[in-house]
Image (cartoon, rainbow, N blue to C red):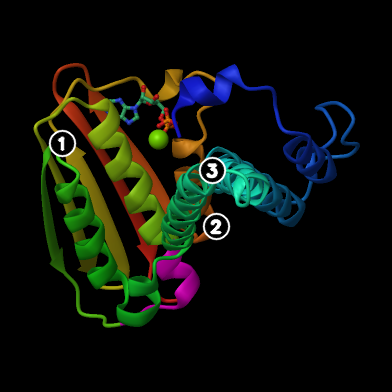
Amino acid sequence: MTDSKRTKRQPLDEIEGLRQRTATPPVGEQGPAESQTEQALRHLLESADHERELIAYDIHDGIAQQVAAAIMQLQSYEHLRRTAPGKAKVAFRAGLEMLRLAQGEIRRLISGLRPPVLDDSGLVAALVHLVQNRRAGGGPRLEFHSDVAFNRLPPPLENAVYRIAQETVTNACKHSRSDRVRVMLTQEEEQLRLEVRDWGIGFDPAAVPAGHFGLEGVRERARLLGGKVTIHSQAGQGTTVTLTVPLAT
Ligand SMILES: Nc1ncnc2c1ncn2[C@@H]1O[C@H](COP(=O)(O)OP(=O)(O)O)[C@@H](O)[C@H]1O
Ligand SMILES: [Mg+2]
């Protein structure tokens, strides 16, 4: 889904509902200073809220539209089937095609949430898969290097590192205008290190306008893992996003 689409549309009621249910009181109404645990919990709720919001937008733009269109086609099939069998057949086929598209969209959404390859084969295989999928879509030349001793990691850690890679690779492909993007996964004793680098236009990470949740989510995930994200970016030189997370829990 594109940002322009998102800004053109009124917020969905359901999304607004979600936001209100998980919203935190405005600054100044929070009472005495939050403890670290309270703060961590609030951040967790906020990042889960953003994610639900994005998923809701995705569903709204994709599956919900296709299913609505399929219903319309199948209703017109119903009306036309006795009086105009030729037209009815066309409507039926169109309806079926819409449902097939919706099915593809559902698969895409599910694999975006937690790709089966991550569950089945672990982080390294999932990153290979991510890079291969991206290559198939054109864009910058993508490289993936890994040098790690582990086979599997705890599922929440695998998932978070994968999502961070997914977001930062998407950013590099979408925003950097680099012709090359490199992903490196390495292990230094008890630390896991993920580096996503491009040689593109660069940007100021401290001046990201409101309403962009990608890097915010990256930082939040890293924090919840007890890890750290650093972004080095220079105009015309490109961007390097580095995540380090402790492996020993
Ligand atoms: N690798 C990159 N190269 C250039 N600009 C980037 C890069 N990554 C992020 N940005 C800039 O930072 C902004 C915020 O990124 P992000 O939080 O992921 O939101 P979004 O991708 O939805 O715009 C982007 O809109 C873009 O301007
Ligand atoms: Mg992004």
Of the residues under marks 1 and 3, which one precedes in the sequence? 3
Element on which disc 3 rests:
helix
The magenta-colored residue range is 152-159
Residue to which mark 2 is pinned = 224
Quarter containing ligand 1?
top left
Q: Closer to the N terminus: mark 2 or mark 1?
A: 1
The N terminus, quarter of image: top left
Identify the secondary structure beneath mark 2.
helix
* Residue 153 on the magenta segment: yes
Task: Out of 245 and 109, give the one closest to the viewer.
Answer: 109
Q: Residue at x 45, y 65 (%)?
A: 114
Residue at 88% in and 39% down: 32
Q: Is residue 37 left or right of residue 56?
A: right
Residue at the spot of label 1: 139
Question: Sequence-wise, which precedes: disc 3 or disc 2?
Answer: 3
Task: Give the residue at mark 3.
Answer: 58
Q: Position of residue 246 (x, y in %)?
A: 39, 66
Three-letter code, disc 2: Leu
Q: Amino acid at mark 3?
A: Asp
User: Alpha carbon of mark 2 to alpha carbon of mark 1: how far?
Assistant: 32 Å
